[in-house]
Amino acid sequence: MEENVKVVETGNNSKHGENRCPQCGASDVTYNINKKKLVCNYCFTEFDAEDVIGIEKNVENLNEEIRGSGTKDINNNVDDIITLKCGGCGAEVVINTKEAVNARCHWCRSILSINSQIENGAVPDVVLPFDLDKKVAEEKIKAFVEKRKFFAHPIFKREFTTNNIMGVFFPYMLIDANCHGSYSGEGGHVARSYEIVVGKDDDGKEKKETVYDIDVFHIERNFDILIDDLSIESSLDKLNKSNKTKTTNIINSIMPFDTDKCVKYNSNYLAGFTSEKRDVNVGDLEEKVYKELKDVTRHSLNADLKYYDSGVKWEKEELDIKGKQWISAYLPVWLYSYQDTKKVLHYVAVNGRTGEVMGSIPMNKKKLFFISLLIDILIFAFIYYFTNGSDNSGFLVFYLFLIVGPIYYHSKSSKYRNKGARHKYETETKNTITNMKKVDDKKRTLRERSSRSLPGANNYKLDGEKVKVKDSK
């Protein structure tokens, strides 16, 4: 852990072993999705969620770096196999923290759990319980697939079933930041648009082109910005959204979660679900986080820059982080997975809180190709019939043949694979800008520009998406 970092012990001295009901002493406590409470399955006592002690909830109060104890660097020398002694009968129960953080005693059926943080990344600071039950998730996944059955691979259509949908808790880092920004550059505003003569065609008629006069301003923005719960996967596998063997971008795309509803970690929330262990440290994510914070800032400023309809070219972007907080979290996802004949793993995922759904469906590409070709042939026949095969229709037929079929093929293929689906963190992360100071000075006018865009405009660029997190093991 770095110097000048405050570590908050979010486990509150929790101990491994049985989580007994304070009312009757039973250890069989689970989370009830319908009641949104932990419930003792023996005496039916209900428990409210616990708040996390020590975590700063007001981002504006951050003036140092705070990290929850669940974000500590993973010690790869720590064994994933942990043996707990059952308090009910004295038997020893083995838990593989790679696969689960709780288990039943095979003798007395008491439930034993890993509750406090251990140095292998298996226990986070907070957990966001499921709000959406399995039946609702099944219906959403089924509806998503049904809309794509026509071009779905025939083997997939035969084998698809909602029976293997699983509830999974995936590991994330939640980052709060209290920042000061100092930005300067140029902004462009379209003063007018008009046509100019650029020559003559073969028939001697004037050829015209629309051009633009752009007023260029020197602009400055100095401000404070509070960024709340920037959410980033802390699994190396899920961070690789361009994986050719897994459609991991699908899981990323169902964000954001309502992370303000996170509660203190309690392994009972995980009963009946699976979980994935964190394998990425804070240090591995720092570059990506900083650039994503700048992306959020850059896009948030656009709300104040609407006058500059040609874009803004930022030449200086300084984001000073006055305080930052890292929290390790488990967030809930309903997941359907299917491996196709080419060993590509396709996912259909449902956000376990909001119900947002996205997926990738294996396609019958041969069928799609022939349908696209048929569309081209029908267009050809249609034009040929109504023009009586005149020579003037030749170019039109050739042009449509080149674009209509490929456009149809690409549009359908995109709808099934959804390669471009992603979490738009730059606009979906909560933030507040205050204490804004502005400078807007007109400097010059660019005349007769063929494009309405300011040369070098960069106010919509993304840097965080380009950062590749490497395995530090």
Image (cartoon, rainbow, N blue to C red):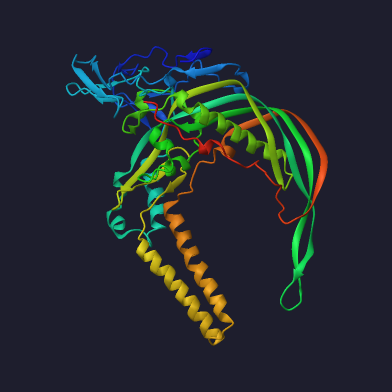
Where residue 309 sits in the image (x, y, percent)? 73, 47
Residue at the far bottom in the pictured view? 388
Q: Is residue 458 visible?
A: yes
Where residue 294 sits in the image (x, y, percent)? 60, 32
* Residue 24 vertical position relative to residue 289 in the rendered view, above or below: above
The quadrant holding residue 365 is bottom left
Residue drawn at the location 76% of the way across and 58% of the way down: 211
The quadrant holding residue 117 is top left
* Residue 204 vertical position relative to residue 150 in the rendered view, above or below: below
Q: Tell which of 275 and 134 is nearer to you.
A: 275
Q: Is residue 307 visible?
A: no
Left or right placement of residue 455 versus residue 291 in this view: right
Q: Tell which of 9 and 442 is nearer to you.
A: 442
* Residue 137 vertical position relative to residue 84 in the rendered view, above or below: below
Where residue 43 sits in the image (x, y, percent)? 31, 23
Tag count in the figure? Answer: 0
The quadrant holding residue 145 is bottom left
Q: Tell which of 190 and 315 is nearer to you.
A: 315
Left or right placement of residue 47 versus residue 63 in this view: left
Where residue 85 sits in the image (x, y, percent)? 23, 15
**Quarter of the C terminus within the rendering:** top left
Q: Tell which of 214 and 368 is nearer to you.
A: 214
Left or right placement of residue 166 versus residue 411 in this view: left
Residue drawn at the location 53% of the way across and 72% of the way down: 400
Left or right placement of residue 305 versus residue 237 in this view: right
Residue drawn at the location 50% of the way across and 29% of the way down: 261
